[in-house]
Amino acid sequence: MFMILMTAGFITGMLGNVLIGLVSCYDWVKNHKVTFINFILICLAVSRMSSLLVVFVDAVIWELAPHVYDSSSLAKCSDILWIMTDQLSIWFATCLSIFYFLKIAHFSHPLFLWLKWRMRSMIVVFLAFSLFLLIFYFLLLGTLPIFMEIYMMAKSNQTLFSDTHKTIAVKNLIVFHLTYLMPFLVSLVSLLLLFLSLVKHSRNCHLISTSSEDSRTKVHKKAMKMLLSFLILFVIHIFFVQLTRWLFMYCPMNSSVKLVMLTLNIFPLSHSYILILGNSKLRQTAVRALQHLKSQLQELILSFHRFSRVFAK
Protein backbone atom coordinates (compact mmCIF):
# COMPACT_ATOMS: atom_id res chain seq x y z
CA MET A 1 0.00 0.00 0.00
CA PHE A 2 2.83 2.35 0.88
CA MET A 3 4.56 1.85 -2.49
CA ILE A 4 1.27 2.18 -4.40
CA LEU A 5 0.57 5.58 -2.83
CA MET A 6 4.18 6.68 -3.26
CA THR A 7 4.18 5.66 -6.94
CA ALA A 8 0.86 7.41 -7.58
CA GLY A 9 2.14 10.62 -6.00
CA PHE A 10 5.41 10.38 -7.91
CA ILE A 11 3.73 9.89 -11.31
CA THR A 12 1.13 12.62 -10.70
CA GLY A 13 3.75 15.11 -9.55
CA MET A 14 6.07 14.31 -12.44
CA LEU A 15 3.29 14.79 -15.01
CA GLY A 16 2.42 18.23 -13.67
CA ASN A 17 6.01 19.42 -13.55
CA VAL A 18 6.85 17.92 -16.96
CA LEU A 19 3.94 19.90 -18.39
CA ILE A 20 5.22 23.14 -16.85
CA GLY A 21 8.74 22.48 -18.11
CA LEU A 22 7.69 21.50 -21.64
CA VAL A 23 5.37 24.49 -22.12
CA SER A 24 8.04 26.90 -20.86
CA CYS A 25 10.70 25.31 -23.10
CA TYR A 26 8.31 25.47 -26.08
CA ASP A 27 7.86 29.22 -25.54
CA TRP A 28 11.63 29.54 -25.35
CA VAL A 29 12.12 27.78 -28.70
CA LYS A 30 9.16 29.51 -30.34
CA ASN A 31 10.23 33.05 -29.38
CA HIS A 32 13.97 32.32 -29.76
CA LYS A 33 14.54 33.76 -26.31
CA VAL A 34 13.76 32.80 -22.73
CA THR A 35 11.72 35.23 -20.64
CA PHE A 36 12.48 35.65 -16.97
CA ILE A 37 9.23 33.99 -15.88
CA ASN A 38 9.86 31.02 -18.21
CA PHE A 39 13.35 30.63 -16.79
CA ILE A 40 11.96 30.51 -13.24
CA LEU A 41 9.27 28.00 -14.23
CA ILE A 42 11.79 25.74 -15.99
CA CYS A 43 14.13 25.77 -12.97
CA LEU A 44 11.18 25.19 -10.63
CA ALA A 45 9.93 22.22 -12.68
CA VAL A 46 13.41 20.63 -12.86
CA SER A 47 14.05 21.08 -9.12
CA ARG A 48 10.68 19.58 -8.22
CA MET A 49 11.10 16.63 -10.55
CA SER A 50 14.48 16.02 -8.92
CA SER A 51 12.97 16.27 -5.43
CA LEU A 52 10.17 13.84 -6.32
CA LEU A 53 12.70 11.42 -7.82
CA VAL A 54 14.95 11.49 -4.73
CA VAL A 55 12.00 10.84 -2.38
CA PHE A 56 10.69 8.04 -4.62
CA VAL A 57 14.08 6.31 -4.88
CA ASP A 58 14.52 6.62 -1.11
CA ALA A 59 11.09 5.06 -0.56
CA VAL A 60 11.86 2.16 -2.93
CA ILE A 61 15.18 1.44 -1.22
CA TRP A 62 13.63 1.79 2.23
CA GLU A 63 10.86 -0.65 1.29
CA LEU A 64 12.72 -3.25 -0.80
CA ALA A 65 16.36 -3.12 0.25
CA PRO A 66 16.92 -1.22 3.51
CA HIS A 67 20.29 -2.93 3.94
CA VAL A 68 21.65 -0.66 1.17
CA TYR A 69 21.71 2.11 3.77
CA ASP A 70 23.94 0.09 6.07
CA SER A 71 26.62 2.54 5.02
CA SER A 72 25.95 5.84 6.76
CA SER A 73 27.75 7.67 3.91
CA LEU A 74 25.08 6.53 1.43
CA ALA A 75 22.30 7.59 3.80
CA LYS A 76 23.94 10.95 4.30
CA CYS A 77 24.38 11.40 0.54
CA SER A 78 20.69 10.72 0.01
CA ASP A 79 19.79 13.21 2.73
CA ILE A 80 21.98 15.91 1.17
CA LEU A 81 20.47 15.33 -2.29
CA TRP A 82 16.96 15.71 -0.90
CA ILE A 83 17.85 18.88 1.02
CA MET A 84 19.39 20.44 -2.11
CA THR A 85 16.43 19.63 -4.40
CA ASP A 86 13.85 20.64 -1.79
CA GLN A 87 15.58 23.95 -1.06
CA LEU A 88 15.93 24.73 -4.78
CA SER A 89 12.23 24.04 -5.27
CA ILE A 90 11.32 26.41 -2.44
CA TRP A 91 13.68 29.15 -3.63
CA PHE A 92 12.34 29.19 -7.17
CA ALA A 93 8.75 29.14 -5.87
CA THR A 94 9.66 32.13 -3.68
CA CYS A 95 11.11 33.84 -6.75
CA LEU A 96 7.66 33.47 -8.32
CA SER A 97 6.17 35.25 -5.29
CA ILE A 98 8.64 38.12 -5.71
CA PHE A 99 7.92 38.26 -9.44
CA TYR A 100 4.14 38.42 -8.92
CA PHE A 101 4.50 41.13 -6.31
CA LEU A 102 6.83 43.39 -8.30
CA LYS A 103 4.96 42.82 -11.57
CA ILE A 104 1.44 43.44 -10.27
CA ALA A 105 1.66 45.69 -7.20
CA HIS A 106 1.68 49.44 -7.66
CA PHE A 107 3.29 51.85 -5.19
CA SER A 108 4.75 55.28 -5.73
CA HIS A 109 7.43 54.86 -3.09
CA PRO A 110 10.96 55.33 -4.54
CA LEU A 111 12.22 52.09 -2.93
CA PHE A 112 9.50 50.03 -4.60
CA LEU A 113 10.15 51.68 -7.97
CA TRP A 114 13.86 50.99 -7.56
CA LEU A 115 13.19 47.31 -6.76
CA LYS A 116 10.75 46.98 -9.64
CA TRP A 117 13.25 48.46 -12.07
CA ARG A 118 15.91 46.01 -10.84
CA MET A 119 13.64 43.00 -10.39
CA ARG A 120 15.94 40.50 -12.10
CA SER A 121 18.99 41.64 -10.16
CA MET A 122 17.09 41.44 -6.87
CA ILE A 123 15.89 37.88 -7.54
CA VAL A 124 19.43 36.84 -8.52
CA VAL A 125 20.72 38.33 -5.24
CA PHE A 126 18.03 36.42 -3.34
CA LEU A 127 19.08 33.15 -5.01
CA ALA A 128 22.75 33.85 -4.31
CA PHE A 129 22.05 34.58 -0.64
CA SER A 130 19.93 31.42 -0.35
CA LEU A 131 22.75 29.39 -1.88
CA PHE A 132 25.14 30.88 0.64
CA LEU A 133 22.85 29.78 3.49
CA LEU A 134 22.66 26.26 2.08
CA ILE A 135 26.45 26.04 1.76
CA PHE A 136 26.77 27.29 5.32
CA TYR A 137 24.36 24.58 6.50
CA PHE A 138 26.31 21.84 4.71
CA LEU A 139 29.58 23.12 6.17
CA LEU A 140 27.99 23.06 9.61
CA LEU A 141 26.63 19.58 8.94
CA GLY A 142 30.13 18.41 8.05
CA THR A 143 31.42 19.48 11.45
CA LEU A 144 28.67 17.61 13.29
CA PRO A 145 29.13 13.81 13.35
CA ILE A 146 25.61 13.31 14.66
CA PHE A 147 24.22 11.88 11.41
CA MET A 148 26.47 8.83 11.54
CA GLU A 149 25.75 8.17 15.19
CA ILE A 150 21.98 8.43 14.72
CA TYR A 151 22.02 5.99 11.84
CA MET A 152 24.34 3.52 13.50
CA MET A 153 22.10 3.60 16.57
CA ALA A 154 19.14 2.60 14.41
CA LYS A 155 21.06 -0.37 13.00
CA SER A 156 22.04 -1.55 16.49
CA ASN A 157 18.48 -1.11 17.86
CA GLN A 158 19.56 1.32 20.54
CA THR A 159 16.75 3.49 21.86
CA LEU A 160 18.76 6.08 23.73
CA PHE A 161 21.90 7.98 23.04
CA SER A 162 24.01 10.39 25.05
CA ASP A 163 22.73 13.82 26.06
CA THR A 164 25.64 15.38 24.17
CA HIS A 165 24.65 13.75 20.90
CA LYS A 166 21.00 14.60 21.51
CA THR A 167 21.89 18.26 22.02
CA ILE A 168 23.97 18.33 18.83
CA ALA A 169 21.15 16.70 16.89
CA VAL A 170 18.60 19.24 18.13
CA LYS A 171 20.90 22.12 17.18
CA ASN A 172 21.39 20.57 13.76
CA LEU A 173 17.63 20.37 13.21
CA ILE A 174 17.12 23.95 14.40
CA VAL A 175 19.72 25.23 11.93
CA PHE A 176 18.10 23.14 9.19
CA HIS A 177 14.68 24.63 9.91
CA LEU A 178 16.12 28.15 9.82
CA THR A 179 16.93 27.60 6.12
CA TYR A 180 13.16 27.71 5.50
CA LEU A 181 12.69 30.97 7.42
CA MET A 182 13.91 33.42 4.78
CA PRO A 183 11.81 32.16 1.83
CA PHE A 184 8.75 32.01 4.09
CA LEU A 185 9.22 35.59 5.31
CA VAL A 186 9.88 36.87 1.78
CA SER A 187 6.71 35.21 0.47
CA LEU A 188 4.67 36.45 3.42
CA VAL A 189 5.87 40.04 2.95
CA SER A 190 5.11 39.82 -0.78
CA LEU A 191 1.56 38.67 -0.01
CA LEU A 192 0.98 41.44 2.56
CA LEU A 193 2.33 44.16 0.28
CA LEU A 194 0.26 42.83 -2.60
CA PHE A 195 -2.80 43.05 -0.33
CA LEU A 196 -1.94 46.65 0.56
CA SER A 197 -1.59 47.43 -3.14
CA LEU A 198 -5.04 45.95 -3.75
CA VAL A 199 -6.55 48.01 -0.91
CA LYS A 200 -4.96 51.16 -2.31
CA HIS A 201 -6.22 50.41 -5.80
CA SER A 202 -9.74 49.65 -4.51
CA ARG A 203 -9.84 53.00 -2.73
CA ASN A 204 -8.82 54.77 -5.91
CA CYS A 205 -11.58 52.96 -7.81
CA HIS A 206 -14.07 53.97 -5.11
CA LEU A 207 -13.05 57.62 -5.39
CA ILE A 208 -13.77 57.63 -9.11
CA SER A 209 -17.07 55.77 -8.49
CA THR A 210 -16.11 52.55 -10.24
CA SER A 211 -18.38 49.83 -8.90
CA SER A 212 -17.31 46.88 -11.05
CA GLU A 213 -13.99 45.09 -10.77
CA ASP A 214 -11.43 46.21 -13.32
CA SER A 215 -8.70 44.02 -14.78
CA ARG A 216 -6.06 45.23 -12.29
CA THR A 217 -8.25 44.24 -9.34
CA LYS A 218 -8.80 40.78 -10.82
CA VAL A 219 -5.07 40.34 -11.41
CA HIS A 220 -4.33 41.39 -7.82
CA LYS A 221 -6.81 38.87 -6.42
CA LYS A 222 -5.56 36.09 -8.68
CA ALA A 223 -1.94 36.69 -7.65
CA MET A 224 -2.93 36.83 -3.97
CA LYS A 225 -4.68 33.46 -4.29
CA MET A 226 -1.53 32.00 -5.82
CA LEU A 227 0.70 33.39 -3.05
CA LEU A 228 -1.70 32.39 -0.28
CA SER A 229 -1.94 28.81 -1.59
CA PHE A 230 1.86 28.65 -1.78
CA LEU A 231 2.22 29.83 1.82
CA ILE A 232 -0.37 27.36 3.13
CA LEU A 233 1.31 24.45 1.33
CA PHE A 234 4.71 25.75 2.47
CA VAL A 235 3.66 25.72 6.14
CA ILE A 236 2.25 22.19 5.77
CA HIS A 237 5.47 21.10 4.06
CA ILE A 238 7.68 22.54 6.81
CA PHE A 239 5.59 20.80 9.47
CA PHE A 240 5.88 17.38 7.85
CA VAL A 241 9.59 17.85 7.09
CA GLN A 242 10.15 18.59 10.76
CA LEU A 243 8.06 15.59 11.77
CA THR A 244 9.97 13.30 9.40
CA ARG A 245 13.39 14.34 10.67
CA TRP A 246 12.38 14.13 14.33
CA LEU A 247 10.89 10.67 13.80
CA PHE A 248 14.04 9.57 12.02
CA MET A 249 16.14 10.84 14.91
CA TYR A 250 14.16 9.19 17.72
CA CYS A 251 12.58 6.13 16.07
CA PRO A 252 14.16 5.62 12.64
CA MET A 253 13.01 2.03 12.25
CA ASN A 254 9.37 2.83 13.07
CA SER A 255 6.79 2.21 10.34
CA SER A 256 5.35 5.69 10.95
CA VAL A 257 8.36 7.15 9.11
CA LYS A 258 7.05 5.58 5.89
CA LEU A 259 3.66 7.20 6.32
CA VAL A 260 5.21 10.61 6.92
CA MET A 261 7.41 10.15 3.83
CA LEU A 262 4.23 10.20 1.73
CA THR A 263 3.56 13.76 2.84
CA LEU A 264 6.85 15.00 1.37
CA ASN A 265 5.20 14.84 -2.08
CA ILE A 266 2.28 17.10 -1.13
CA PHE A 267 4.09 20.39 -1.70
CA PRO A 268 5.87 19.72 -5.05
CA LEU A 269 2.74 17.98 -6.36
CA SER A 270 -0.06 20.32 -5.25
CA HIS A 271 1.65 23.64 -5.91
CA SER A 272 2.57 22.60 -9.45
CA TYR A 273 -1.08 21.94 -10.30
CA ILE A 274 -2.08 25.24 -8.68
CA LEU A 275 0.38 26.96 -11.03
CA ILE A 276 -1.15 25.14 -13.98
CA LEU A 277 -4.68 26.19 -13.00
CA GLY A 278 -3.56 29.77 -12.41
CA ASN A 279 -1.74 30.13 -15.73
CA SER A 280 -4.03 30.32 -18.78
CA LYS A 281 -1.41 28.94 -21.19
CA LEU A 282 -0.55 26.00 -18.93
CA ARG A 283 -4.22 25.35 -18.23
CA GLN A 284 -5.16 25.34 -21.93
CA THR A 285 -2.27 23.00 -22.72
CA ALA A 286 -3.34 20.65 -19.93
CA VAL A 287 -6.94 20.65 -21.22
CA ARG A 288 -5.81 19.88 -24.78
CA ALA A 289 -3.57 17.08 -23.49
CA LEU A 290 -6.45 15.57 -21.51
CA GLN A 291 -8.79 15.82 -24.52
CA HIS A 292 -6.21 14.13 -26.73
CA LEU A 293 -5.68 11.42 -24.11
CA LYS A 294 -9.45 10.94 -23.84
CA SER A 295 -9.83 10.57 -27.61
CA GLN A 296 -6.95 8.09 -27.77
CA LEU A 297 -8.46 6.11 -24.91
CA GLN A 298 -11.85 6.03 -26.66
CA GLU A 299 -10.22 4.80 -29.88
CA LEU A 300 -8.40 2.11 -27.91
CA ILE A 301 -11.65 0.96 -26.29
CA LEU A 302 -13.42 0.87 -29.70
CA SER A 303 -10.56 -1.13 -31.17
CA PHE A 304 -10.73 -3.56 -28.27
CA HIS A 305 -14.49 -4.02 -28.78
CA ARG A 306 -14.02 -4.63 -32.51
CA PHE A 307 -11.28 -7.17 -31.81
CA SER A 308 -13.42 -8.94 -29.22
CA ARG A 309 -16.35 -9.16 -31.67
CA VAL A 310 -14.13 -10.61 -34.39
CA PHE A 311 -12.63 -13.07 -31.93
CA ALA A 312 -16.11 -14.07 -30.71
CA LYS A 313 -17.22 -14.91 -34.24
Image (tube, rainbow, N blue to C red):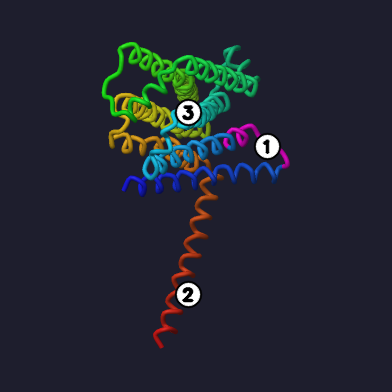
Q: Quadrant of the C terminus?
A: bottom left
x and y percent of residue 308 in the render?
41, 79
Q: Could you classify mark 2 by the number of other residues whose Cα lies within 10 Å: few (under 14), some (14-19), or many (20 or more)?
A: few
Taking depth in this image into account, of 15 and 280 the one nearest to the observer is: 15
Which residue is disc 1 drawn over? 34
In terms of secondary structure, what is the magenta stretch mainly?
helix
The reply to whether the magenta stretch includes residue 265 is no
Q: CA distance from mark 1 to mark 2?
A: 43 Å
The first of marks 1 and 3 along the sequence is: 1
Which residue is disc 3 drawn over? 73
Q: Is residue 171 left or right of residue 278?
A: left
Taking depth in this image into account, of 214 and 116 the one nearest to the observer is: 116
Q: Is residue 119 left or right of residue 58?
A: right
Magenta segment: 32-41
Q: Could you classify mark 3 by the number of other residues whose Cα lies within 10 Å: few (under 14), some (14-19), or many (20 or more)?
A: few
- Asked if 300 appears above or below 252 in the picture, the reply is below
